[in-house]
Amino acid sequence: MERIFENYLNDIYVDVLNFIEDTNLNIKFLHFYRKKPNLLVCELFDENQENTNQFRHICVTYSLSAMYQYLSVYKKPISREDIPLTANEIDRNSDFYESSVAMTLLCSVVDKLTGPANEALEYMLEISNHSYMSSYMNINDISPINFKRIAEIEDMDVKQFEKAITTNTVAIEICKEKTKISVKLNKRMEEYSDCDLSDNLKVRILIGIIRAKYFMEENETDKFDCIYYHQSNVMDFPNSIHL
C-alpha cells in the first residue's frame, strides 16, 4: 500500500471517528464504498432520538487526490429497512468500535489483508488513541478568512474573474470536461460596467472549481447566480454540520 494513499485513509478514519463521537449526532450505521478511483464515500446514518426506526442520511465524499471532503445531508429521513445491508452497525460506547470502523474502511479499498494492509490497520488503531486531527476540509467551510491561501494552492487566478465578471453577469457555470475545468459566464444583453466582486462570490467560485476538479463527473455542471452572494459575514451556502 502506497504511503500517500495510506495517509489519506488515516485522515478519513479520524474524520469519520469525529462524526461518530459528535454528541449532536447518534450514528448507528456506516457504509464505505469506492465511487471511482479517486473518491471514497462514507454513508452515516444518524438515529432519530424520538423515532428509533428513522435515520438521517449523511453522505461524506472524500477525495483521494487532495484533502477535501464534500458533505451532503438528505432532508428526507430513511427507515432502518432502507439502510444498505452491507452497512456496519456502530456502537460508540463499545470499547472496540474504533477497530470496527478501521476494518470497515480498509476492506472498502483493498481486496485482501496483505502485510502492508495489516500495517495500515495497526497504525489507524494507534492514532485513534491520540488527539490526532484530520487534515480533511469540507469544501463548504471555505470562507473569506482562508480563501486566499486555498486559492493559491488551487492556482485560482482571482484577477481573471474580477476582470471578466461585470454588472450584467447573472450566473456562473462551472463544468468538468474530461481533464479540464471550464467556466461560463451568463450575461444579460445590456450596457455594463466593471464591478467589485464580494468576498462571498469569490469563495463560491473557488468552491465550484474545487468541486469540479475533485468531485464532479465528466460533463457535470455547477451553476449558481451571482446576485445572492452579497457581502456579509455568513455566506448563503450550506455549511458543514461540524460544530
Image (tube, grey):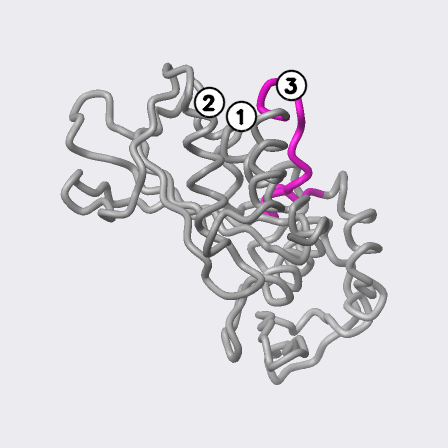
Q: Quadrant of residue 166?
A: bottom right
Residue 44 on image: x %, y %:
37, 39
- Foreground mark, 3 or 2, reads 3
Task: Give the overall secondary structure of the magenta segment.
Answer: loop
Q: CA distance from mark 2 to mark 1?
A: 9 Å
Residue 4 on image: x %, y %:
72, 51
Q: Mark 2 sits on what residue?
A: 22
Q: Nearer the viewer, residue 137 or 183?
A: 137
* Label 2: how many Cα within 10 Å (few below 14, some 14–19, many 20+): some
Q: Mark 3 sits on what residue?
A: 130
Q: CA distance from mark 1 to mark 3?
A: 21 Å
Q: Amino acid at mark 1?
A: Leu
* Label 1: how many Cα within 10 Å (few below 14, some 14–19, many 20+): few
Q: Which residues are magenta?
A: 127-143
Mark 1 and mark 2 in contact (Cβ < 8 Å)? yes
Q: Which mark is residue 125?
A: none
Q: Is residue 54 above or below residue 105?
A: above
Q: Is residue 100 left or right of residue 189?
A: left
